[in-house]
Structures are given as structure tokens and as C-alpha cells.
Amino acid sequence: MNLQESAEYADFRQEIRTWLEANLPPNTATGRRDYKGLDDAVFSHQWNRILGQKGWLAYNWPAEAGGTGWNVAQQVIFEDESRRVGAPIPFGFGIAMLGPTLIRFGSEAQKQRFLPPITRHEERGLHVD
């Protein structure tokens, strides 16, 4: 089994690394981040908005749903590089639960209404009027 990273993935890793290092807000990289409740919620929201502007918040969603369309290896590289610089891995109700549920079971109208704002971190949950 060859565990060497291909040139294509090495280039992808460098792209991710360069962007993360250039865009992670100053004084936020803390190395290892353990979830301790909502103590870092403000930073996570700020970071999620930055990732959403880049189009990387829904990094594990298919492209047709507004995600990156990255394959599993690319997702792992993104997570690895995020951890390396101390950036939180995107997670939350909208990204981790609501979005994937709508992608799988939602109507087209629900997908059009909710998925784009979730990927930009404008919606984090379901608000029904």
C-alpha cells in the first residue's frame, strides 16, 4: 500500500494551507482545540462566515447542494490543515444536521430556500414563519 500523497493532493494541501494561513483571524490559532461548550462560539461564527464567503463552509457537501464537492481525501486534507493552524472544523446544526437531511430528503423548494444561506453561515437552523 502506497501512503505517499500524490502530487495533485500535495498541490491541493498547499492551496488549503496557504489560504488558511492568510485568512485565519490573528490571535485565534490555539493549536489543539477541544470542545468546551459555547466558550468559543463567537470565534466559530466569525470563522464560519469567512469559510462561507470562500465557499468552504460546507466542505463535505456535494457541489450540486452548494458544497465544495471535495472527495474524502480532500476533506481529510482540509481537516488536517485546519487542525494544524488551530482553526475549528466547521460543525453546527445547519452544516452537520439540517443541510445533509435536506440534501437527502428535502423538496426542491426547501433546498433552494435553506441550503444557500446555510453554506454562507447566514442560517444555522430552521426558522419557520
Image: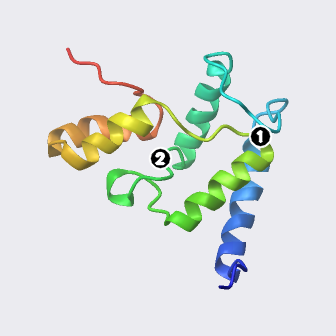
Q: Secondary structure at mark 2?
A: loop
Q: Quadrant of the N terminus?
A: bottom right
Q: Give the residue at mark 2.
A: 58
Drawn side of residue 59 relative to residue 110, left or right: right
At 61% from the left edge and 38% from the top edge, which residue is drawn? 50
3 lies left or right of 117: right
The percent position of residue 30, horizontal first and vertical second, equals: 82, 33
Q: Amino acid at mark 2?
A: Ala
Q: Nearer the viewer, residue 76 or 8?
A: 76
Q: Quadrant of the C terminus?
A: top left
Q: Position of residue 19 (x, y in %)?
A: 72, 53
**Label 1 sits on residue:** 86
For the point 82% across and 38% down, the residue is 31
Residue 3 drawn at (x, y percent): 70, 79
Residue at the image point whose x is 37% and y is 36% from the top: 97
How many marks the image carries: the answer is 2
Q: Identify whether 48 is placed above or below 64.
A: above
Where is residue 87, by image quadrant?
top right
Rendering quarter of residue 96? top left
Residue 86 vs 126, above or below: the answer is below
Q: Residues within 10 Å of mark 1 (few under 14, many from 20)?
A: some
Q: Residue at x 76, y 34 (%)?
A: 25
